[in-house]
Image (spheres, rainbow, N blue to C red):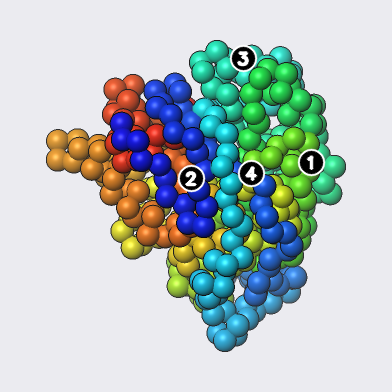
Amino acid sequence: MPKRGLKVRRSKSLYKKRKSGFRKAVETMMFCALLGGLVFVGIVIAQALFNYTPPKEDPVDNPVTDISKPPDDETTEQPDSDSASEEQPHLNNGELASSVYINRDALITGDSGALRAQLQSARANGFSSVVIEMKDDTGRVLYVSEVEGAAFVSEYVEAFTPILTAKQIADICAEEGVVPVARISTLKDHTAPSGVVYSGWLDNRRENGGKPWANPYSERTVSYNAEITAELYASGFENVIFANTLYPVFGSYDIPLLPEPVTNPSTNFIGLMNFLNGVSGGVPQANTLIEVKMSDFRGDDLSGSATILRNGGDSLHVKGITLIFEREYFDRFSATEDDVESVVRTAFETVRGYSGGLEILPVLDGAGISDNDRERIVEAFGKNGYENFAVKNY
């Protein structure tokens, strides 16, 4: 494997160099931001922006609420990349640690012994850091939280009563000799309280199982996620990954109902960007990362989780990107026509075009990938200069 490190503007490499086998995956988590203060620029709208009246042919039993229009065109200009870059926190050298995502069932069994068992297994397999889902993809907070609204129960998900606080979870990790890293779902949230989730915006028609998402333009959505991040940091989670910072897929019935700046890909990334900067700016001392899926890049077409990078990584006030390599991405290529090293090289080149000064941590999602292919992908990471990576579903 080549001995090249990752290139990070304005600072030294975040990682130490060390060769890694598949079960010796590495976690990149960043330490100590130098600048504080809340950075929340532009279009924050206090009222729920997207509540709308469903079309007559698609009845929904939700009352119509106030609709606030997005700012005029002159107020939705893209932020100046250079000025945003100057405010970007410097990255510092961090301690090399192998990282693995553990099964969230360790928190929902109602028994701390299940968590210890997974941590002990991770440690036995050579991992010194674990990524723990603390707010899942339905929005459920999987620990005992003091944040207002965190225990809200929604009709859309199964109720869950956590038994451990975030501090207890972090302390158990310390006792088992592993570093805890929190992962929280931000905008994909079907369970949050009023002012965050609103019934007017569904990810599908209600009769087809559509569920509400969080409103990135609401001040309450920003403060709710910032309070959770701050609580996790204070409990011992210095590193927090923001996942699902994206819009639901807009259907044909959404386009005429929602404001154009929201559904238009050339403008709607601004709402995501300002939301994320508001959350991370509220907890500047935490080491925050944004989760992005490689499958959401198709050349110059950015969708889903990659939408937030449309203005470049220097506009985001986080420390790095966890880049998920999953089977969905590799299925685009033919094994007989495209060698893995070349496919992985193309992936990194594509993402580096948008990442700016943010360092990239590749994450191999092993779900549906054979052991042999996993080894080939890991080898390709190293050959492309990324000896540091994390794994999930291994």
Residue type beneath disc 3 = Gln
Residue tagged by mark 4?
A: 31
In the displayed structure, does residue 235 sit left or right of residue 372?
right
Between circles 1 and 2, the one closer to the viewer is 2
Q: Are marks 1 and 2 in contact (CB under 8 Å)?
A: no
Q: Residue at x 68, y 67 (%)?
A: 40
Residue tagged by mark 1?
A: 234
| Whether residue 228 can be seen here | no
Residue tagged by mark 2?
A: 13
| Whether residue 278 can be seen here | yes
Residue 155, image x, y percentages: 71, 44
Disc 1 or 3, which lies upstream in sequence? 3
How many other residues sit within 10 Å of disc 2, few (<14), some (14-19) or many (≥20)? some
Query: Which labelled disc corresponds to residue 120?
Result: 3
Tell me the SS state at disc 1: helix
Between circles 3 and 4, the one closer to the viewer is 4
Tell me the SS state at disc 4: loop
Residue type beneath disc 2 = Ser
Residue type beneath disc 1 = Ala
